[in-house]
Amino acid sequence: MRSLLKLIPVIAIVIFASAFTNNLEHGKGYDVGDVVEDFKLKNIDGSFISLADYKEAKGFIITFTCNTCPFAIAYEDRIIALDKKYASKGYPVIAINPNNPNTKPGDNFEAMQQRAKEKGFTFPYLVDEGQKVYPKFGATKTPHNYLVQKTKKGMVVKYIGAIDDSSRNPDAVSETYLEDAVDALLNGEEIKLQKTKAIGCSIKV
């Protein structure tokens, strides 16, 4: 009994520490319902892009991706398809490379330009110079996707996570999470699944 009594304070400390850690983790980036702060980042054509530049947009599909991660590469064609499907409906793709090029030379600016040309990217491919934007979003993987909608409050996060349920093989997709979320917004409906786990490579700092 005495041993049990001695353990109670220890258990309480562990529970408190765990809860505190979870709160910190939750507070590291935007959650669904949060308003996104605008940014201005360099595009591969040398211009600078911000969300405010898109006056007619209803929202954005913001994807943190890169040149070098096998998961990101596997999703490139699907990201292009998303832009082709939804840009004309008011939800264009904006891709941001969050990786530090000093750590991952294959993600430097010139490599980004080359990759975009090879793949025929139809969307901006921006450099998160100084890695200041991705932490605000709370992105941890490439790819990591955020659907935001323009509202009176600003750009509000509506979905966070994966594009679909097959990170490697597009032919094996059975759940199109991101498309379903955009379609729900376009139809004025509630998004049924607002968060999924992003599958990909860790962002290189």
Image: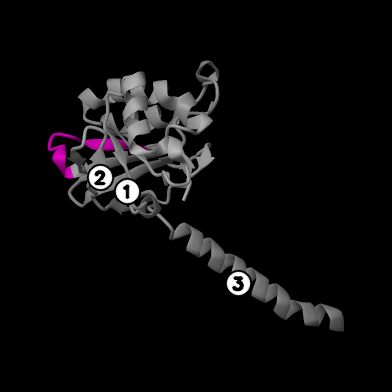
The relative height of residue 166 versus residue 42 in the rendered view (above or below) is above
**Nearest to viewer (mark 1 / mark 2):** 1
Residue 126 quadrant? top left
Q: Secondary structure at mark 2?
A: strand
Judged by depth in the image, the label closer to the viewer, 3 or 1, is 1
Sequence order check, earlier mark of 3 and 2: 3
Residue picked out by circle 1? 129
Q: Could you say where residue 87 lies in the image, as x and y percent from the top left?
A: 24, 26
Q: Is residue 187 above or below residue 4?
A: above
User: What is the three-letter code of the residue carrying label 2?
Assistant: Leu
Quarter of the picture holding the N terminus? bottom right
> Can the viewer see residue 3?
yes
The residue closer to the viewer here, 77 or 9, is: 77
Task: Answer yes or no: is residue 193 visible.
Answer: no
Picture coordinates of residue 161, whole percent (x, y)? 45, 40
Q: Which residue is mark 2?
A: 41
**Can residue 131 be found in the magenta stretch?**
no
Identify residue type, mark 1. Glu
Q: Quadrant of residue 52?
A: top left
Secondary structure under tag 3 reads helix
Marks 1 & 2, CB-CB < 8 Å contact? yes
Alpha-carbon distance for marks 3 and 2?
A: 40 Å
- Looking at the rendering, which quadrant does residue 82 occupy? top left
Say whether disc 3 or disc 1 marks the residue closer to the N-terminus.
3
Residue nearer the viewer, 3 or 145: 145
Mark 1 or mark 2: whose residue is earlier in sequence: 2
On screen, residue 193 versus residue 56, left or right, reads right
